[in-house]
Amino acid sequence: MASIDVNNIFSVSPGLFTEKCRELFSFQYDHNPVYRQWCQLSGIGPNEIKTLTDIPALPISFFKTHMITSTHFEPELIFESSGTTQTINSRHLIKDAAIYQKSFEKAFRLFYGEESDWCILALLPSYLERKHSSLVVMADRLIRSTNHPESGFYLDELEKLSQTLQKLEALGQKTLLIGVTFGLLDFAEAYPQQLKNTVVMETGGMKGRRKELTRPEVHALLKTGLGVDLVHSEYGMTELLSQAYSKGEGRFYCPPWMKVMIRDEEDPKLVKESGTGLLQVIDLANIYSCSFIATEDVGRVYEDGSFEVWGRLDNTDIRGCSLLVI
């Protein structure tokens, strides 16, 4: 088996999720030499997989040191985590850009409806500046899909952003203001206002830019500064092709083709479907890289599959959205 039916990935039902994971595990075990070696070192092969918690998760740091590909291909896209000259960045080689587009479009519509209903304003670098950022690629596509004349990137244009928001508010236009956390905090401080028709969504990113704050502290500042009752959040990363969303209070929900579990900090082989510890992600959209990822994020997974992110494990590298504009 050298390919997977993409449509089956995005239409998977809860009852067939485990079966699809076993199928994808076998495919990646056969066609991803790095992942196969990791599974062999873990003493797990396809015949040992009885439940989801049996599937070995590849440490996310491997994306910094190895080419994580299932089958051989020339990538259509290469996503790279943000960083400085002193950091080693993750690289995610994308065989088929259409899979990523289908993943983020279906997830956005699942949680927020059609793009054409929205005006999307992004406090992010433009696509031309960061074309290897998976977040920027997603935002660029969603912005263009709105077909709204005011949709666009506003990272270095806070005054223009404020004026645009006021105009959209006066028109009653449903608006999404999405941005890195420090960018939203800077905007809320410089241009405080009362937003009634706007969803504010933070994508993370504080390290190296501001005093480190907890998510509740960040949300409290944004609620006060921008006059919103709730702050939404997006959970995604370079190494994943899917995103989870929170519509408030920092509790994230996954699309049907994504699942988050918990592994023990002391014993990484001890994995549970709920509880507290390190987050472990299954992303079926990662067909041609690796769908089973052990992150460095600490949090909690609830019995209904929703989860919270409390922070990153100590002594891990500064990474991600916080470095997008450095």
Image (cartoon, rainbow, N blue to C red):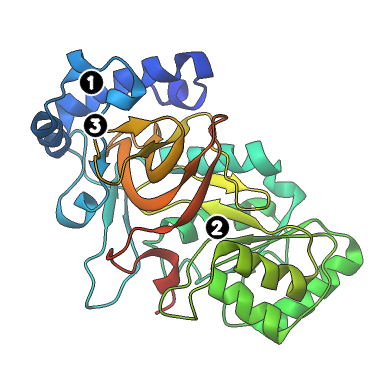
Nearest to the eye among marks 3 and 2: give it: 3
Q: At label 1, which amino acid type do we have? A: Ser
Q: Which residue is mark 1?
A: 26
Helix, strand or loop for disc 1 = helix
**In terms of image quadrants, where is residue 271?**
top left
Circle nearer the N terminus (3, 1): 1
Residue labelled with disc 3 = 56
Q: Quadrant of residue 285?
A: top left
Say if 273 sits above or below 295 in the image.
above
The image position of residue 185, as x and y in percent, is: 62, 76
Asked whether residue 122 appears in the rendered view, the answer is no
Give the side of residue 54 with respect to residue 260, left or right: left
Tag in front: 3 or 1: 3
Answer with mark 3 or mark 2, whichever residue precedes in sequence.
3
Residue 33 visible here: yes
In the rendered image, residue 281, in percent from the top left (x then y), is placed at: 38, 39
Quote the CA–CA distance across marks 1 and 2.
33 Å
Nearer the camera: disc 1 or disc 2: 1
Q: Amino acid at mark 2?
A: Ala
The residue under the point 61% across, 69% down is: 218
| Crowdedness near tag 3: few (<14), some (14–19) or many (≥20) residues, C-alpha within 10 Å | many
Residue drawn at (58%, 46%) of the image: 245
For residue 229, above or below residue 260: below
In space, the residues marked 3 and 2 are separated at their CA atoms by 32 Å
Q: Quadrant of the C terminus?
A: bottom left
The residue that label 2 is drawn on is 139
SS of the residue under disc 3: loop
- Which residue is drawn at the image coordinates 90% and 64% (left, top)? 171
